[in-house]
Amino acid sequence: MNELPRAQANAAVRDFLSSRDWSAQTPARQRILVAFLSLATAKGFSSVTMRTLGRELDMKAPSLYSSFPGGKEEIVAEALSWFTHRFARDLLAAAETTATAEEYWAALVRFHLAQQLQRPEADLWDLLVATDRVARFLSNDVRQEVAFWIKLHEDMYVAAAKEMGFRLSTKSVHVIFTLLDGAGRWAGWNGSAAELDIILDHAVLLTRSILEVGSGTHTLA
């Protein structure tokens, strides 16, 4: 019996997550990463230095460098990787609770959009990845990890679309990701849980419309 596309996509994400063991992450390193993401989100990436990070944490420079000998560059790389893996882990957990392809699609959309609205560091992740395309400040390893995750994330949508009888083109999935990543500019969320549910439901409908228009047909037969 052939495995469903959704199951294959989920298995690929699990393999990705198993490639990095975060259990050895020390409390000191994790505290630094959380502080960096918070500061960079609030004040801008370029404004965060080892000195400002030290002040935020009430730590001396030697203590910061003992955890991250590579300084800010290493912290940025680790923060990107850490956020990527947490996003992938939590997305997979949400997706695996679904029973149908339609529910799976909705879970992907709702999780992605909720992250963009509720976790400001998601916008920072988008900014850093976009900036690297021009400035090329990330290491090849981090850049490849990010690119690999983006492809796995896209493949989850492709798998759901296939089971629903649609062909999801690369262009259409990019349009969907652009819509979800830019939620802060169009959602107008007032901060309430009830309003968030309405926005998430609306996003599911919007993305399904993009899927249907981009496919040009509802059947793969």
Image: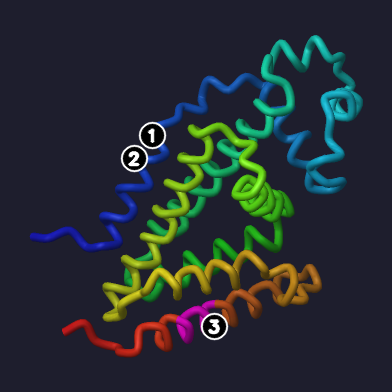
Is 147 left, or right, of 63 in this rendering?
A: left
> Looking at numbered disc 3 in the image, what kind of residue is underneath it?
Leu
Residue of label 2 = 15
Q: Mark 1 and 2 residues: CB-CB less than 8 Å, in contact? A: yes
Task: Report crowding for label 2: few under 14, some 14 to 19, many 20 or more residues within 10 A (C-alpha).
Answer: few
Task: Report crowding for label 3: few under 14, some 14 to 19, many 20 or more residues within 10 A (C-alpha).
Answer: some
**Image vertical order of residue 128 relative to residue 109, above or below:** above
Disc 2 secondary structure class: helix
> Looking at numbered disc 1 in the image, what kind of residue is underneath it?
Ser
Residue beneath the point at 30% across and 61% down = 6
Residue of label 1 = 18
Q: From the image, give the main secondary structure of the stretch colored magenta.
A: helix
Q: Is residue 209 magenta-colored? A: yes
Question: In x, y percent, where is residue 80?
Answer: 61, 39
Residue beneath the point at 61% across and 31% down = 78
Residue beneath the point at 27% across and 57% down = 7
Which residues fall within the magenta stretch?
Answer: 204-210
**Image vertical order of residue 80 relative to residue 151, above or below:** above
**Image vertical order of residue 17 relative to residue 112, above or below:** above
Is 103 left, or right, of 217 in this rendering?
A: right
Q: Nearer the viewer, residue 220 or 160?
A: 220
Question: In x, y percent, where is residue 175?
Answer: 52, 73
Tell me the CA gap for discs 3 and 1: 33 Å
Residue of label 3 = 206
